[in-house]
Amino acid sequence: MADRILKRLLREEFLVTLATGEAFQGLLVELDERTLRLTNASAVSKTSRVEVVGDLYIPRADVLYLQKPR
């Protein structure tokens, strides 16, 4: 069910927080049972934002949660 919802939200912006506490924001452009792919992504923290060069592939097992940014 979650995959079906996420697939409807492809090409929308998400903030992805990993279990390690790291966070990335970008357009969700693809997902499968193991991986999320973000484009136009940035690594974000409370004090900075660093642009990611190229697409960012994130293992789903490492994702703590996804949220829509404000």
Image: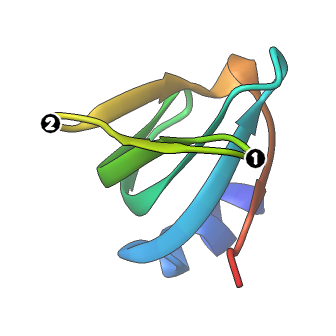
Q: x, y percentage for residue 53?
A: 17, 34
Location of residue 51 by image quarter: top left
Amino acid on which disc 2 is placed = Gly
Left or right of 48 in this view: 5: right
Q: Earlier in the sequence, mark 2 or mark 1?
A: 1
Front-most of residues 11 and 7: 11
Give the residue drawn at x 68%, y 41%: 45
Q: Secondary structure at mark 2?
A: loop
Front-most of residues 1 and 68: 68
Location of residue 54 by image quarter: top left
Q: Residues within 10 Å of mark 1 (few under 14, many from 20)?
A: few
Residue identified by numbered label 2 = 54
Give the residue drawn at x 33%, y 33%: 56
Left or right of 26 in this view: 23: right
Amino acid on which disc 1 is placed = Lys
Quarter holding the N terminus is bottom right
Q: x, y percentage for residue 25?
A: 52, 54
Q: Secondary structure at mark 1?
A: loop
Q: Residues within 10 Å of mark 2 (few under 14, many from 20)?
A: few
* Residue 26 - label: none
Quarter holding the C terminus is bottom right
* Residue 46 - label: 1
Classify 31 as above or below 54: below
- Residue farthest left in this picture: 54
Q: x, y percentage for residue 27?
A: 38, 64
Give the residue drawn at x 75%, y 39%: 17
| Circle nearer the viewer, 2 or 1 | 1
Give the residue drawn at x 72%, y 18%: 61
